[in-house]
Image (tube, grey):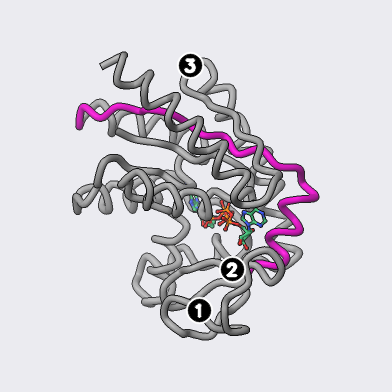
Amino acid sequence: MIWIFLGAPGAGKGTQAERLQGDFGFVQISTGELLREAMRAGTELGKTVQGYVTRGELVPDDLVAAVLQERLAQGNTGNGVILDGFPRTVRQAEILEEILQKHCWQLCGVLYLEASEEVVQERLGGRRNCPQCGANYHVVTMPPKVDGRCDRCGAELVIRPDDTPDAIRNRLEVYHRQTEPLVAFYQQRGVLERVDASGDVDEVYRSVKEAVSRRWRQCLADG
Ligand code: AP5
């Protein structure tokens, strides 16, 4: 079973997907994190995508789809996969449909996390990221236990290179132009669940769990 988390940068896709995987046995696959891992490791892929990611532009469709397919081919997909940040264009959504058909996988639901521009800007502005394990924090809403250090691995937290004011502006603009059309795309297919993502992490998570449970029942009924 495949789940998609859709929403603006900073809507909380990564935060909610991480919680959900613990409770439901799903596996979160974040294309952004796969690209950042490649950048950290200095691989050819990492060097190719660095400029796009840092400027807040989308990596070309075929390239990011190949990265996703490589990850899916490794297995370890638990009770289902949460795609966090893929697809981001209509072309990517079409590629995903081909992948699902080929493997006889079912798209169970698309959770659309909705939050205002003001809310997402505040979240991205305060985010701190672990360069070693990828964990995310927020200086106000989700601070680490020890100031500036990752709870999981102890590494020094950093500001993501695409969390600068210019890159944030660009990412939001790119999101409205290239990703938002997916809302209508998935609404037409009857799999879209709107989730109000403006509350605190626990409030949003309650709504996410309700939406997942509803869609899951529907999915099982559809076979
Ligand atoms: P990616 O890593 O996917 O970034 P994004 O979509 O911009 O999403 P973010 O990670 O910024 O936000 P989020 O919604 O996950 O929020 P989070 O939970 O972290 O992609 C990065 C780049 O990679 C792209 O710009 C592109 O270049 C490339 N890329 C990736 N996928 C691609 C694709 N498919 N095609 C092409 N290019 C691709 O939360 C944000 C902050 O808010 C955190 O600090 C968190 O602690 C806090 N927070 C979260 N929820 C709450 C809450 N409810 N209340 C208070 N604080 C909260």
Upstream in the sequence, badge 1 or badge 3? 1
When the figure is inspected, residue 159 is found, relative to residue 195, above or below; the finding is below
* Secondary structure at numbered mark 3: loop
* Label 2 CB less than 8 angstroms from ligand 1: yes
- Closer-to-camera residue (110/52): 110
Pinpoint residue 21: horizontal percent, then vertical percent.
38, 49
When the figure is inspected, residue 106 is found, relative to residue 34, above or below; the finding is above
* Secondary structure at numbered mark 2: strand
- Closer-to-camera residue (137/118): 137
Name the mark nearer the viewer: 3 or 2.
2
Pinpoint residue 83: horizontal percent, then vertical percent.
41, 44
Pinpoint residue 120: horizontal percent, then vertical percent.
71, 52
Which segment is the magenta one?
A: 103-127
- Mark 2 — residue? 137
Q: What amino acid type should be assigned to the residue bearing mark 2? A: Tyr
Q: State how many labels appear.
A: 3
CB within 8 Å, label 1 to label 2: yes
